[in-house]
Image (cartoon, rainbow, N blue to C red):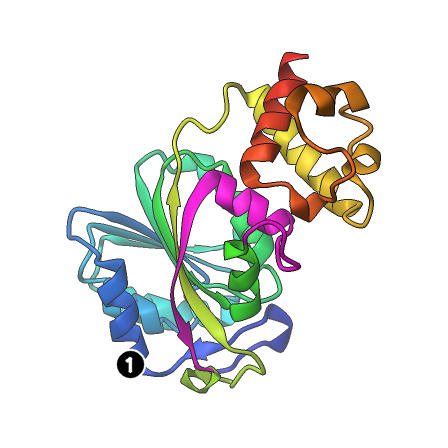
Amino acid sequence: MQYKKRLGQHFLVDQNIIDKLIKHIKPLKSEMFLEIGPGDGALTKSIINKVNRLTLVEKDSGLIKNLCEISDGYPNTEIIRCDFLKYDLNQITYPLRVIGNLPYNISTEIIFKMCSHQNTIDMHFMLQKEVVDRIVAEHNSKSFGRLSVMAQAYFNVKRLFNISENVFFPKPKVKSSFIRFTPKNNIFFSKKQENIFFDLVKSAFEGRRKMIRKSLDAFLQKTDFDNLKINDALRAENLSVNDYLRLSEYVEKN
């Protein structure tokens, strides 16, 4: 199987790990699944006969023929040749479980894209361990950043286990982790608040070395921080996810 370094491809080749992934995912015959970047189909082969419907979104045209061979005889499977970041999720209206061994170079963008998709039941991803460290990080730590806030605002996140680099080909230079995302409901009072939250968090961490009174001066003044009882001399990583939600609610109302 040819791999393309520019696409960040690392194919899973250890069946024991694949079986462990499936055990944690627990697919049911009644469920609809979307697999992002199925690659050579290692995970696809183990899940295709266990679900009601499977949509495969693969960018690499060189892998499509192999995926067609795997899905031959399975009318429940649809293969979409597309860059997932350009794929319109709104065309999927049914409740969806999402899985994937995500390319290291676009994994953060994929998670941001999934944040506001309304029909997601849960997501199980293999990611670079360092990315998962950031996703699950708590505030007041160096790993806590924009990705941590966005992921934890929209999802309950849980690292399930770490994965050795030896189970992939080609062997990556980093370890991976397997993580579960379970969506939270009714996070925002309005779409406007959600947009403010997105922009506010982005601004805070673009100026993460600044005190928040500087990085967020386009949104809030000193009296606003006083009203919210938030110290305006703190930096972006010192605020909790709940603090950012409170700030976005306050800005939306005022």
Front residue of 187/221: it is 221
Front residue of 107/244: it is 244
Front residue of 245/52: it is 245
Count residues near mark 1 (Cα–Cα under 10 Å), then give few for <14, some for 14-19, many for 20+: few
| Quarter holding residue 178 | bottom left
Q: Position of residue 32 (x, y in %)?
A: 27, 47
Location of the N terminus (image quadrant): bottom left
Residue at 59%, 33% in the rendered image:
243
Q: Is residue 118 left or right of residue 113?
A: left
Q: Position of residue 210 (x, y in %)?
A: 82, 45
Q: State the SS at label 1.
A: helix
Q: Position of residue 151 (x, y in %)?
A: 51, 46
Q: Which residues are magenta?
A: 138-164
The answer to whether residue 147 is magenta is: yes
- Name the residue type under label 1: Gln
Residue 126 visible (yes or no): yes
Residue at 62%, 31% in the rendered image:
197
| Quarter holding residue 43 | bottom left
* Residue that mark 1 sits on: 15
Name the residue furthest left.
Answer: 29
Q: Position of residue 34 (x, y in %)?
A: 36, 52
